[in-house]
Image: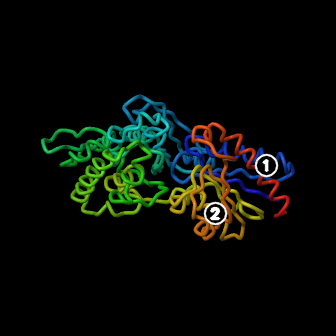
Amino acid sequence: MKIIISPDSFKECLPAWQVAQALATGWRNVLPDSHLVCLPVADGGEGTLDTLIHATHGAFHEKIVTGPLGEPVKARFGILGNQPTAVIEMAQASGLEWLTPEQRDPLRATSFGTGELILAALEHEIDTIIVCLGGSATNDGGVGMMSALGAAFLDQHGAPVNSGGAGLSAIAAINLSRLDPRLKQVKVIAACDVTNPLTGDNGATRVFGPQKGASAEMLACLEQGMGNYARQLQRYCGKDIDAIPGAGAAGGTGAALLAFLDARLQPGIDMVLDAIHYHDHLNYASLVIVGEGKMDQQSLNGKAPVGAARMAQKMGVPVIAIAGYVERGLGDALRESGIEACFPVVNGPCDLPTALRDGEVNLIQLGENLAGFYRAVLS
């Protein structure tokens, strides 16, 4: 039998490769002769950089950049091994991983470090930059990133606005005269795992602001600022960037890439599946196991598990999923996407810190249970 194990990362718990290895360990404890193929996937969020660089035998580079709250952090970017393309993962420089829950503050958090990573990538001989949007701690509309690249966002007095989401409401003018000229020589692709617009009930602030530390009062302030930013973008480029699906990705960074760098938005999962030749691996597979930390309504919109499952479904390969948390009422929608069943990782009631701490042990146990079930019912 050939079993493909293709989880995404479990946010704040384990990277995708470690999730895959834990499941494989448990499975082999029960069925040691199984042919297991571990193919971690990603959808533009954390882990996309590693997946793309490893899949193409590329090279990693490190750079000290500005973290989300202005602190120096060591971040990585990569150059693909099969083409002159740089991969920037926003989470590396401007991600939630750099902050404790108590430190999260989207009014202050900046994407400046992501812009610094892009500048570092431009020092290499490249013709394309892939910016992976996901896992950001920011809600600044990509203003910090663009500022690092030479753009100026000015208030009504002609002074630079404050960094972070707090500065968006003060933007009265945008000046790109000092934008790094090398950006005109490269194509920019935004790898995106969501289709949210910039503003509104389904926009960047209201959907993703709470997980970045925004209180109800803060959300109102941030949404007001994002509304002003959307108007300034439309005035600057003559396009309704606000309504473009994906503009709200990574706290509105998708909008900045669209408006200022003429980026093309592409589903991150499609990019990753192509890079790892996922279609070829599905040949002669008996089962695919996908997963992520939280399986909810958002999982149905461009996320890695559903993207991998749909490809497997087209090839007639059955798919099951695992998740740290499984939202109720998703059964029919998951089955329509090719996922026949979804199994929670935790084996009993517990709080979130305990679930995160015991993630690897629970995944090994789940791997054993899945293998036992496969042996008893499916083989």
Q: Gap between marks 2 and 1, in whole Å?
A: 22 Å
Residue with the most extreme front position: 349
Q: Is residue 225 left or right of residue 38?
A: left
Residue 38 appears in the picture as rendered: yes
Q: Position of residue 115 (x, y in %)?
A: 38, 41
Q: Residue furthest left?
A: 157
Q: Tell me the residue that label 2 is attached to.
A: 309
Image quarter where the N terminus lies is bottom right
The residue lying at 29 percent from left, 50 percent from top is 220
Q: Nearer the viewer, mark 2 or mark 1?
A: 1
Q: Residues within 10 Å of mark 2 (few under 14, many from 20)?
A: many
Residue type, numbered disc 1: Glu
Q: Report which residue position mark 1 lands on.
A: 368
- Which of the pair 219/312 is nearer the observer? 219
- In this view, the residue in front, 136 or 112, is 136
Mark 1 element type: helix
In the picture shown, does residue 299 fall above or below 225?
A: below
- Closer-to-camera residue (47/147): 47
Quarter of the figure with the C terminus: bottom right
Q: Is residue 14 among what the camera can see?
A: no
Residue depicted at x 65% and y 58%: 277
Say what amino acid the circle numbered 2 marks: Ala
Mark 1 or mark 2, which is nearer the start of the sequence? Answer: 2
Horizontal and vertical percent position of residue 132: 48, 49
Q: Position of residue 22 (x, y in %)?
A: 72, 43
Is 115 on the left or on the right of 331, as rendered? left
